[in-house]
Amino acid sequence: MLNSFFYLVKQGFKNLWNNHLMSLASIGVLVSCMLLIGAAALLSINVSNIIDELEDQSEAIVYLDDDLSEEWINYVRENIVATGKIATIEFISKEEALYSMMESMGDDGILFEAYSQGDSNNLPDSFRITFDDVSDLEETLAKIETVDGVYSISALTEVAEVITGVKRMVYIGGIIIIGLLIAVSLMIIGNTIKITVFSRRREVNIMKYVGATNGFIRLPFIVEGISLGVISGGISYGIIYFAYDYLVKWVSSQNATWFSQIITDLVPFSVISDYLLIGFLAGGAFIGLFGCVAFIGKHLKV
Amino acid sequence: MIEFQNVTKKYPNGTIALNKVDLRIDDGEFVFIVGSSGAGKSTLIKLMLREETANSGIVKVNGKNLGKMPRYRIPKFRRSIGIVFQDFRLIPNMTAYDNVAFALRVTNVPSREIKRKVPYMLNLVGLASKMKCKPEELSGGEQQRVALARALVNSPSLIIADEPTGNIDPELSYEIVDLLNEINKLGVTVVMVTHEHDLVEQFNHRVITIDKGEVIRDTEGLEANVC
Ligand SMILES: Nc1ncnc2c1ncn2[C@@H]1O[C@H](COP(=O)(O)OP(=O)(O)O)[C@@H](O)[C@H]1O
Ligand SMILES: [Mg+2]
């Protein structure tokens, strides 16, 4: 069993070498596809990183009705948290609200001194909330608004809408681009296998007549397909490794331009390198295997 | 044993290559199948190898009904048959030795057995001294003997040869058939397709004549009549 297995695996590598022009061409195209996939992935990772930061900064103030009891305030807090989209929630009493208002006004804050006495502070109690997910923000806010004891909410829903839109675009765009590129990669592998099958039709024919099993007849082609995928994955990783490293350094050196206002720092390569390496190698192997299996039946009548 | 019962083969394009063929070849026989080009000889062979299936009728080889054989059984079935073609079908960049060994390497035969069997077979076909030659360094007759060694190396009980002498000089053709004859004497059934009447006449074997997809004549060899 293993005897033939290793023999045929070796034949697969031999094919790769014997058709080196074809192999190089396929690797070239596969690497291009993988670089584009990698770039699309890195772009969407960074975009969603920026969006996450924006999301973390987006907050809303929930104003409460006057003179709620402590239990009632707790009841409102629980109901806000129950919406499931809240990152942090912080109670701000009317006194704290007044102080922070006075503080923010600097020297003029003293003018409000009088309101801190007795019942004259007519600022409301409130909750300051931040979101970990601003999609469907309108809906979330509407839910909070119906809670008994909530007077009103102030939030920048337009920003949330833009964020949600961008997020969806990045997500869908990324999937479409990556899907297309994977399809192209599959075609490339399929085409290479077609050419190899043609150049080895004599061996295939003989194997058929001497009673080699279908699995064994396919084995060299599968080895070839997987090798093409894995080699391309390795090369692509290497290229991205250096290119992205260079980009990260370049971005962080761009202080004080419009650019640095938007992007302070890229996601460091070390954060994604393992996923990228595994993704490229496993993805390459998968594309090689799948491209092979999907197309081999068409060219190989066994 | 090979048995055809009322076998009809119609190709998808409508050509009826075989029409209601009945025939029976017993174990140990040597049979020539003759007929003009396009008569249906190769189709007959393809049905025996389960490369094609009959549209109607039954094809049985070595007791197995090929029409009912599941695909996954085909490889094992083919290992019991040695096949030789007109165009030798050797792998150009492999030596004679490797060409013969190839049949064993791709069918799970242990390497110790390969090292023993391959030289034995090449010796049997008279090519012991040319083991290391590539096909291009061999004559047509020698190439066909390598192919024959490859067909024999799995110890088949049946050898099927489709015009094995078609690409060989007539003087050397006799040698190939003679070799098949020797193999037949070892108990291997031989079915050989040819359209060279001269060659057939030099051997006293059963001759099945096919014309337009039908068996029109089936004559026993003289030897058979003797006993
Ligand atoms: N794969 C095929 N598809 C369609 N027609 C075929 C095919 N193979 C053979 N034929 C036709 O079937 C007939 C018999 O062919 P074949 O068995 O090859 O004859 P022979 O070997 O006696 O020359 C011929 O008319 C040939 O054209
Ligand atoms: Mg023919």
Image (cartoon, coloured by chain):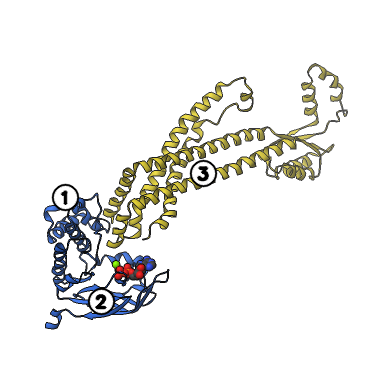
Chain colours: A yellow, B blue
Using the numbered discs, state the Cα–Cα distance from disc 2 to disc 3 in whole angstroms. Answer: 59 Å
Same chain letter for marks 1 and 3: no
Query: Where is A247 relative to A139, above or below?
Result: above
Looking at marks 1 and 2 on the same chain, the residue that comes earlier in the sequence is marked by 1
A294 relative to A59 in the view: left or right: left
Using the numbered discs, state the Cα–Cα distance from disc 1 to disc 3 in whole angstroms. Answer: 48 Å
The answer to whether the residue bearing label 3 lies less than 8 angstroms from the nearest atom of ligand 1 is no
Residue drawn at point x = 56 percent, y = 35 percent: A43
Pointer 3 indicates a residue of which chain?
A
Pointer 2 indicates a residue of which chain?
B
Pointer 1 indicates a residue of which chain?
B
Would you name the residue on which mark 3 appears?
A: A181
Q: Amino acid at mark 2?
A: Thr
**Along the line of sight, which residue is nearer the eye, B55 or B33?**
B33
Q: Tell me the element at label 3.
A: helix
Same chain letter for marks 1 and 2: yes
Q: Residue furthest right?
A: A120
Query: Where is B92 relative to B204, above or below?
Result: above
Q: Amino acid at mark 3?
A: Leu
A103 relative to A167 in the view: left or right: right
How many C-alpha atoms fall within 10 Å of the one at disc 3: few (<14), some, or many (≥20)? some
Would you name the residue on which mark 2 appears?
A: B209
Q: Residue B132: tell me if it is visible.
A: yes
Q: Position of residue A135 (x, y in %)?
A: 68, 42
Q: Residue B77: tell me if it is visible.
A: no
Residue drawn at point x = 77 percent, y = 22 percent: A104
Q: Position of residue B150 (x, y in %)?
A: 21, 60
Would you name the residue on which mark 1 appears?
A: B132
Q: Tell me the element at label 1.
A: loop
**Quarter of the rendered image showing ligand 2:** bottom left
Q: Residue furthest top?
A: A107
Residue drawn at point x = 54 percent, y = 36 percent: A42
